């Protein structure tokens, strides 16, 4: 009585380089398992901050007396700076004389 062993089909495994590619693809694909994928939602990177608008102050000449007469206290300064320097009148560039 001769008993033959059952024939087992030979399974061809892919090469090592192909196996690593398959393993990487299986980790990325969402069809394998949704729990494996780590998703992080960051709102700060998608929202762009709007640039702040510069406040441009008019510059002018500060005078010691009213109606832009007398000694010049300072040139190319703002009206608020003229007030702090005890100026009585201020004239912007290309403008009319203004009391401070």
Image: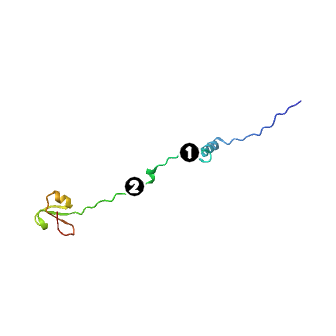
x and y percentages locating residue 15 in the rendered image: 66, 42
- Dot 2 or dot 1: first in sequence order is 1
Q: Residue furthest right?
A: 1
Quadrant of image for the N terminus:
top right
x and y percentages locating residue 85 in the rendered image: 15, 57
Give SS at disc 1: loop
Dividing the picture into quarters, in which one does residue 59 lie? bottom left
Q: Callout 2: few (<14), some (14-19), or many (20+) C-alpha neighbours within 10 Å?
A: few
x and y percentages locating residue 64 in the rendered image: 12, 62
Kindly identify the residue that appears in the image at 64 percent across and 42 percent down: 19
Q: Is residue 68 left or right of residue 17?
A: left
- Foreground residue, 11 or 62? 62
Q: Which residue in the structure is indicated by mark 1? A: 37
Kindly identify the residue that appears in the image at 13 percent across and 68 percent down: 67
Give SS at disc 2: loop
Q: Is residue 20 above or below residue 44?
A: above
Q: Which mark is residue 49?
A: 2
Q: Is residue 71 left or right of residue 77?
A: left
Kindly identify the residue that appears in the image at 45 percent across and 51 percent down: 43
x and y percentages locating residue 48 in the rendered image: 42, 55
- Tag 2 and tag 1, C-beta contact below 8 Å: no
Quadrant of image for the C terminus:
bottom left
């Amino acid at each position: 009585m001769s008993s033959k062993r059952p024939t087992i089909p030979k399974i061809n495994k892919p090469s090592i380089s192909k196996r690593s590619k398959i393993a990487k693809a299986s980790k990325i694909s969402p069809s394998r398992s949704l729990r494996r994928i780590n998703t992080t939602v960051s709102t700060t990177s998608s929202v762009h901050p709007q640039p702040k608008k510069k406040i441009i102050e008019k510059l002018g000449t500060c005078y010691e007396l009213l109606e832009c007469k007398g000694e010049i206290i300072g040139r190319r300064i703002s009206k608020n700076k003229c007030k702090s320097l005890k100026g009585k009148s201020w004239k912007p560039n290309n403008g009319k004389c203004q009391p401070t």
